[in-house]
Amino acid sequence: MAKSRPFGYYVVRAVRISGWLMLPLLVLYVCTGYALAEWFGMHRLLSEKTATALHVNWKLDRLLVLLLVVHAGGAAYLALRRSRWFRTRKPT
């Protein structure tokens, strides 16, 4: 039988994975927003149609909020556990 891992292991994994998934999504979201606003020359890289399709139609904001909740919630849990707000059971 496989040894079960503590809950903290899965929280650390979720924080790391969500952080890496958020990085390219956030860059894409900001770049498409700048292209729509015609700031920093981004409108030269992305057409308005492409930027609208990516920024609005893909609904990247919902995915970013979901990843942010997982990332920030997990990181907050780990920080509170380190400061001993949560007590963990000792393995038997």
Image (tube, grey):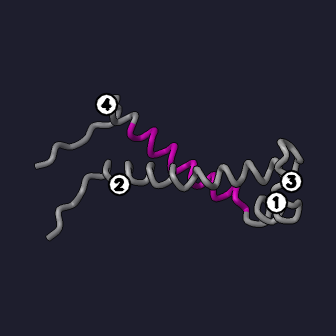
Q: Which mark is residue 10?
A: 2
The spot of residue 10 in percent (x, y) is 35, 54
Image point 33% across, 33% down: which residue?
Answer: 82
| Type of amino acid under label 2 | Tyr
| Type of amino acid under label 1 | Ala
Q: According to the image, label 4 marks what residue?
A: 84
Q: Secondary structure at mark 2?
A: helix
Q: CA distance from mark 3 to mark 4?
A: 51 Å
**Disc with the residue nearer the chain's start (2 vs 4):** 2
75 and 47: which is toward the camera: 47
Image point 44% across, 50% down: which residue?
Answer: 16
User: Which quadrant of the structure image shows residue 4?
Assistant: bottom left
Comparing labels 2 and 1, the label whose residue is closer to the camera: 1
Q: CA distance from mark 2 to mark 1?
A: 35 Å
Magenta part of the chain: 59-78
| Type of amino acid under label 3 | Arg
Q: Is 64 included in the stretch rendered in magenta? A: yes
